[in-house]
């Protein structure tokens, strides 16, 4: 379909703060970009060479201005995999997102129109991967390597600068609190009627001042301990987040992993109080039940795409610190069956149990009826996909969102039969503070200003 291309590469020694450098690259970027981070290893990508846009009714691949269409079928993600398979580009990696509304296409729930987005991925023209003391520069056009090296050195200089102390305040305590309590009470009634076992309902908190998203990402990442983090401007979204768990990870060898977190208490930095809340997590029947049924469903979902008897629970109900909260966490894995792909694994596990509910279809229906606006990126996934068949899909929670001139935060809580509206409201507050404490005003634009100054110096 397209001319064969390959990435030109250059490897450089690198000993700076990869997360700060990635944020500085974002602050200076005028194109679409994605930063994806795991344990300090940063993948930075900019300027789409190829874009896959999937909607409920159609999927398109755009390469160098030429558009190719793929018909939608009964399996919504198949055309996305087919589109990427058409690329004649060696060693590609695609970066992008799948919104929560993909769940409606997968499970026949909620409200969908043919043009509702269900995935957006881009294969970049230029990449920088920062890991293990090395910066790997990659570009389709070999001439871009010199400019990438210059930009990297400029970003390293800017990353040493401090972020101002001023922060924006968002009303995580009271905004929409009464409405959320009412929604929780109604959901508990449906659960007790036998309609479903669990649902996650969320509330939106607007941010009325202009936010510097790259600086917010940087200070927020320093204040969180996420499973993955991301910073992106792609497909109409500008967002940054500190993902507490993965939806799915598939290695090139076909090992599939998922990581449900369910059960939450605050984590405030007082060791004695935090230990007491940790012990309370294990004693609370509601939290233990919520977690156990999530693990049970995760096993069932992995069994659909994995070889028989290979699914294992590698960690069960340990406690993971995640910024302003601590969670009960488990990790499960299995061997992907030969007839399945990473896209099948994502479809089986999406949306994350801990962001939707059990069973998923009635939970998604209840979410669509109860929440006043579409979720979009919230509780969807930010993901990378490689030409070797591997995939890493991070659950989008603990994030800040910008779209169409609006900026907001969003958080939810897992509701079961024993839930109380006040406790679930408090859980959303605890989660929102993972982001709300780090909102840097855009008026200062510290990283952008410092990057410009460093370039002049």
Image (tube, rainbow, N blue to C red):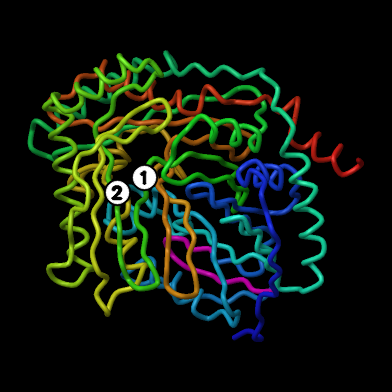
Disc with the residue nearer the chain's start (1 vs 2): 1
Pick whichever, 18 or 413, lies toward us. 18
Kindly identify which residue carries mark 2: 259
For label 2, the SS is: loop
Q: Residue at x 27, y 71 (%)?
A: 336
Q: Is residue 454 above or below residue 111?
A: above
Q: Do callouts 1 and 2 mark residues in contact (Cβ within 8 Å)?
A: yes
Pick whichever, 456 or 79, lies toward us. 456
Kindly identify which residue carries mark 1: 245
As drawn, the label of residue 345 is none
State yes or no: residue 86 in magenta.
no
Q: State the image coordinates of residue 249 (x, y, percent, origin top left).
A: 37, 59
Mark 1 to mark 2 CA distance (whole Å): 6 Å
Stretch of the chain drawn in magenta:
53-64
Q: Is residue 147 above or below residue 341?
A: above
Viewport quadrant of the C terminus: top right
């Amino acid at each position: 379909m397209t001319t064969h291309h390959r990435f030109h590469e250059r490897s450089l020694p690198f000993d700076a703060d990869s997360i700060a450098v990635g944020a500085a690259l974002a602050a200076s970027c005028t194109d679409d970009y994605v930063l994806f981070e795991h344990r300090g290893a940063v993948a930075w990508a900019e300027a789409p060479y190829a874009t896959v846009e999937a909607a409920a009714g159609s999927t398109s691949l755009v390469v160098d201005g030429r558009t190719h269409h793929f018909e939608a079928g009964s399996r919504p993600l198949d055309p996305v995999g087919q589109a990427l398979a058409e690329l004649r580009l060696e060693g590609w990696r695609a970066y992008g997102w799948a919104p929560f509304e993909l769940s409606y296409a997968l499970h026949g729930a909620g409200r969908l129109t043919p043009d509702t987005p269900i995935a957006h991925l881009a294969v970049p023209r230029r990449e920088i991967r920062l890991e293990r003391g090395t910066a790997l520069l990659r570009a389709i056009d070999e001439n871009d390597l010199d400019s990438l090296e210059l930009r990297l050195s400029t970003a390293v200089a800017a990353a040493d600068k401090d972020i101002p102390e001023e922060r924006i305040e968002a009303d995580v305590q009271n905004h929409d609190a009464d409405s959320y309590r009412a929604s929780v009470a109604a959901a508990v009634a449906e659960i007790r009627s036998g309609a479903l076992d669990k649902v996650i309902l969320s509330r939106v908190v607007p941010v009325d001042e202009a936010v510097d998203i790259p600086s917010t990402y940087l200070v927020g990442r320093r204040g969180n301990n996420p499973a993955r983090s991301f910073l992106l401007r792609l497909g109409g979204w500008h967002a940054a987040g500190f993902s507490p768990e993965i939806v799915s990870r598939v290695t090139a060898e076909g090992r599939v992993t998922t990581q449900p977190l369910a059960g939450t208490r605050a984590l405030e930095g007082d060791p004695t109080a935090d230990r007491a809340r940790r012990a309370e997590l294990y004693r609370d029947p509601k939290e233990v039940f919520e977690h156990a049924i999530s693990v049970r469903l995760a096993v069932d979902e992995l069994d659909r795409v994995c070889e028989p008897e290979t699914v294992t629970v590698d960690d069960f109900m340990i406690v993971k610190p995640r910024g302003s909260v601590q969670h009960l966490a488990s990790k499960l894995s299995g061997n992907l069956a030969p007839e399945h792909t990473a896209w099948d694994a994502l479809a089986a596990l999406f949306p994350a149990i801990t962001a939707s509910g059990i069973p998923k279809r009635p939970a998604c229906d209840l979410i669509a009826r109860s929440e006043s606006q579409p979720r979009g990126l919230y509780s969807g996934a930010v993901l990378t996909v490689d030409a070797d068949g591997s995939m890493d899909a991070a659950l989008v929670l603990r994030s800040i969102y910008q779209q169409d001139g609006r900026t907001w935060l969003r958080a939810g809580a897992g509701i079961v039969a024993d839930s109380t509206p006040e406790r679930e409201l408090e859980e959303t507050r605890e989660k929102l503070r993972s982001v709300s404490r780090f909102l840097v005003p855009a008026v200062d634009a510290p990283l952008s200003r410092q990057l410009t100054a460093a370039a002049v110096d």
